[in-house]
Amino acid sequence: MIAITGATGFLGSHLVSACASRKIAVRCLIRPRSPRADRLHASRAVTVETDFNDEASLAAALAGCDTVIHALGLINGTDEALRKANVECTRNVVAAARKAGVARFLFISSVAAIRRHGAYGESKFGAEEEVRKSGIAHLMLRPAFIYGPRDENNTGLLIRTLKRWPLIPLLGGGGFKLQPVYVGDVVDLILKSLEAPFDGRIYNVAGPRQVALKEMLELLGQSLGLKRVFVPIPLRPVQALVRIYLSVFKNTRLPAKQILELNKHEAFDISGTERDLGFRPMDFREGAKLCAAS
Ligand SMILES: NC(=O)c1ccc[n+]([C@@H]2O[C@H](COP(=O)([O-])OP(=O)(O)OC[C@H]3O[C@@H](n4cnc5c(N)ncnc54)[C@H](OP(=O)(O)O)[C@@H]3O)[C@@H](O)[C@H]2O)c1
């Protein structure tokens, strides 16, 4: 039996549907009164409500499971909220997994843990440390920007913007590059990695190439049949204002720190993932059509 945390989320709910269609038995560990529990109804998944702050409650929920896929995570929030959700919940799930005799632990980390950019990157790295020192056989996947149907934050936000505004201002002309990976490809990889040895390896999970934000908007717009005008906004003056803002409001929830990093175009090496796990992610050109059709 495979236990899945974060099952009510964007990635987790796709994973649960894929398991249901492949008849893989899973148990979804969800928090009480999860606002998105209804996402799991269609796949008729077995759900267990548990307290992620309580090791005993988690160990009881994990009884009889041989594998945990830990996809629970918080992406945006205050430093404290990120630490609690990403580091503390992971620590508790790992400790409970040991207590329940779970043999294998698959952790969904993030490419943000590589350079530990910002509080999110720090918290995902901290969570990885909890898994590394657990003594449980483990694997870690580090996804980049995941997109696809039911995504509210990434392409979901881009699609809402395209639908609403005929004129779209783009910081730095939208030259900022991402390496988007389709959610279905991430799910397939998670399921493939269950057949790999759990030898502590870490794999980057990103699309086949970097795509500038402007090209992403153009491809999504084409797929939606929308023609939009993009208005470039110079990046440097905005970054100067953000620096002043951050010197006053140190614990802001606004993505101010990300704006300071907009001109850092890091490419992620996925050759190890391709070689060891047969990862073959689709290009955003194809993925954009699937997003628009959903
Ligand atoms: N989306 C991306 O582009 C991306 C990229 C790289 C890595 N990741 C990682 O992939 C994982 C899944 O991301 P996602 O996009 O699916 O995120 P999501 O849609 O926001 O889902 C997050 C999941 O974690 C649960 N969760 C969050 N904070 C919690 C807490 N304090 N206690 C208990 N449960 C909590 C949520 O439960 P509720 O539904 O009850 O809120 C939900 O099931 C995360 O670990 C994230 O760091 C995502």
Image (spheres, helix red, strand yellow):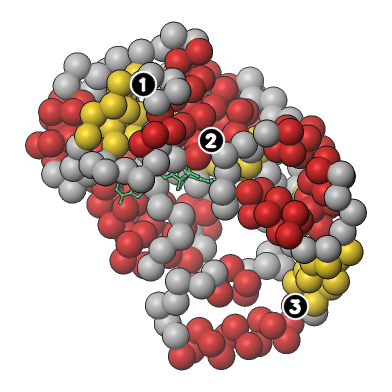
Pick the residue in front: 274 or 83: 83
Residue at 27%, 18% in the rendered image? 66
Q: Secondary structure at mark 1?
A: loop
Residue at 41% over, 63% down: 77
Is the residue indicated by label 1 positioned so its CB lies within 8 Å of ligand 1?
Answer: no
- Tell which quarter ligand 1 is in: top left
Mark 3, residues whose alpha carbon is within 10 Å: few (<14), some, or many (≥20)? Answer: some
Amino acid type, mark 3 = Leu
Mark number for residue 220?
none
Quarter the C terminus occupies? top right
Residue furthest left as drawn: 56
Q: Residue at x 50, y 84 (%)?
A: 246
Q: Nearer the viewer, mark 3 or mark 1?
A: 1
Quarter of the image holding residue 284? top right
Instruction: Provide the residue designation for mark 3.
Output: 235
Residue type at numbered disc 1: Ala
Residue that numbered label 2 is attached to: 203
Q: Which residue is mark 1?
A: 45
Whichever of labels 2 and 1 marks the residue nearer the N terminus, that label is: 1
Q: Are marks 2 and 1 in contact (CB under 8 Å)?
A: no
Mark 2 closeness class: few <14, some 14–19, many ≥20 residues within 10 Å: many
Judged from the image, the secondary structure of the residue bearing numbered disc 3 is: helix
Furthest residue in direction top, as rendered: 23
Q: Earlier in the sequence, mark 3 or mark 2?
A: 2
**What is the CA distance from the residue labelled 3 to the residue labelled 1?**
46 Å
